Image: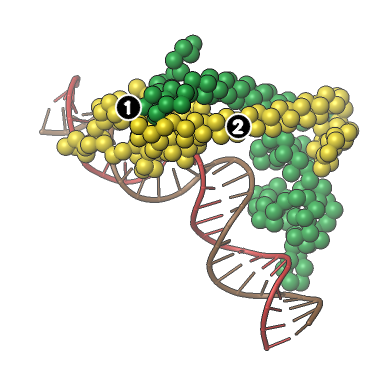
Chain colours: A green, B yellow, C brown, D red
Amino acid sequence: MRIGELAKQTGTKVETIRYYESSGLLPEPARTQANYRDYDLSHMERLTFIRRSRALGFTLESVRELLRLADDSEDPCDAVDEVASAHLVAVDQKIADLTALREELSLMLQCCGDGTVGECKIVSALASPRLPGDAG
Amino acid sequence: MRIGELAKQTGTKVETIRYYESSGLLPEPARTQANYRDYDLSHMERLTFIRRSRALGFTLESVRELLRLADDSEDPCDAVDEVASAHLVAVDQKIADLTALREELSLMLQCCGDGTVGECKIVSALASPRLPGDAG
DNA sequence: TATGCACCCTGTAGTAACTATAGGGTCAGG
DNA sequence: CCTGACCCTATAGTTACTACAGGGTGCATA
């Protein structure tokens, strides 16, 4: 299978596939006589794993580790569980941060009347280190 | 005020302040005889505005626009409101995306027993393009 | 006077995870 | 023979900083 075909099958850009190869995430495939990359099923499975992990927010560094762990199929899967659990914690933290930020933003927007920039509460809220009335 | 002092006052790194200047967000300050940057109150206010906006998740490009809009204090503040509202929508979207991702991740983790990597449901979930039992 | 130290300067390169471009080669159809 | 779709490598761009390298300034101290 050529790179364009693999790209279509997995919903990945051609350049991204080459990038994964250069980063050591995807093994170098065989080459045709024309020096085209020639992929097989194992490449497709590995790329699917990578894309799925990325879609779930794992960094490439974590994907690299997950792949390494997944390669030893007789090892206990504690380590896999640990990587994924740590990621869940990080995602929860990010959601919490964004939610707090969202509240501040929303409060700020509610204060905007239909006046001029000079009177605008958004502008003055941004100009002060903390939102007026904000604890902490 | 020298750059180190401004950095301390606003909780910004010295390099970041210079970066904002080179990006055109912060006007070039006067220089002392020793060629040190010499800041006044207006710089501190502008930097505070930038940092507050960044903390609320605005991109530097948006900050640039907000600053431009805020500079004409007699204009109506509709445009400011629009930039901030658009950002709120984007933040809401990001929270929704992360929350969906969090659910998938959590489901996946619940399936992990204490077996080997070969049997691990996390590994097989990552290897399939969609989570088994996932709609869509 | 020398020297050490904290501070400042410019300019450049590194980070994450791609994406885009330049400049070229391969191959099937018309 | 030519066009167009595909492939190749190598390099630079993106965001918002951060971290050097290599050097200058200015004050206090030995």
Instruction: Using the rendered image of the protein, determine whether residue A126 is visible from the camera's viewpoint.
Output: no
Q: Earlier in the sequence, mark 1 or mark 2?
A: 1
Residue marked by disc 1: B44
Relative to D25, is B101 on the left or the right?
A: right
Do the residues under discs 1 and 2 have CB atoms within 8 angstroms?
A: no
* Mark carried by residue B25: none
| Residue in view at x 66 percent, y 41 percent | A60
* Residue type (three-letter) at the residue carrying disc 1: Met
Both labels 1 and 2 in a single chain: yes
The one nearer the camera, B71 or B113, is: B71
Judge whether C6 appears above or below A67 on screen: above
Residue A34 point in image, percent of width and height: 74, 71
- Image-quadrant location for residue A74: top right
Spatial CA span between label 1 and label 2:
30 Å
* Residue type (three-letter) at the residue carrying disc 2: Val
Residue D23 point in image, percent of width and height: 26, 44
The quarter of the picture where the N terminus of chain B appears is: top left
Relative to B134, is B71 on the left or the right?
A: left
Residue B107 point in image, percent of width and height: 81, 27
| Residue in view at x 75 percent, y 60 percent | A4
* Mark carried by residue B89: 2
| Circle count | 2
Judge whether B63 appears above or below A29 on screen: above
- Image-quadrant location for residue A76: top right
Q: Residues within 10 Å of mark 1 (few under 14, many from 20)?
A: some
**Dot 1: chain letter:** B
The quarter of the picture where the C terminus of chain B appears is: top right
